[in-house]
Image (cartoon, rainbow, N blue to C red):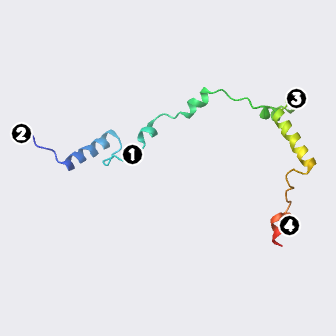
């Protein structure tokens, strides 16, 4: 007749096994995320997979004498200039605390 092993003895065996094989002792089976922490990181592989993106604005800033024109930026600057001429542009920034609209409103 086989003797049954007590739960406390079984728990001690599992704890010792975890110490020997250097695994996490988790008697309550709580979620730890260990599976994902052990996994290889995906970021470096994804960065290598996609080629670098050519940025026209960055190229234009780097090589100013090459004559590279960012048409979207040129159009934006033209639109800002048109709005300023019509009085629809952004308000001027305050140079110091005395010129700010907030302090003028409190007076």
Foreground residue, 42 or 22? 42
Which-is-in-front pick, marks 4 and 2? 4
Foreground residue, 23 or 76? 76
Indicate the quadrant where residue 99 lies. Answer: bottom right
Q: Residues within 10 Å of mark 3 (few under 14, many from 20)?
A: few
Q: Is residue 35 left or right of residue 69?
A: left
Q: Which residue is mark 1?
A: 31
Can see residue 70? no
Q: Which residue is mark 4?
A: 98
Residue sitting at x 30%, y 48%: 27
N-term-proximal mark, 4 vs 2: 2
Is label 4 in contact with label 2 (beta carbons under 8 Å)? no
Q: Which residue is mark 3?
A: 67
Can see residue 73? yes
Q: Which residue is mark 2?
A: 1
Indicate the quadrant where residue 22 lies. Answer: top left
Q: Is residue 31 left or right of residue 99?
A: left
N-term-proximal mark, 2 vs 1: 2
How far apart marks 3 and 4 lie (CA) works out to: 43 Å
Residue sitting at x 84%, y 68%: 104
N-term-proximal mark, 3 vs 2: 2
């Amino acid at each position: 007749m086989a003797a049954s092993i007590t739960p406390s003895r079984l728990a001690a065996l599992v704890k010792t096994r975890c110490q020997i094989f250097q695994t996490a002792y988790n008697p309550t089976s709580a979620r730890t995320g260990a599976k994902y922490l052990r996994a290889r990181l995906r970021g470096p592989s994804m960065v290598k997979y996609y080629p670098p993106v050519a940025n026209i604005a960055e190229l234009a800033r780097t090589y100013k004498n090459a004559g590279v024109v960012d048409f979207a930026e040129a159009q934006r600057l033209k639109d800002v200039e048109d709005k300023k001429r019509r009085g629809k542009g952004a308000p001027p920034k305050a140079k110091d605390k005395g010129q700010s609209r907030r302090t003028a409103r409190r007076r």
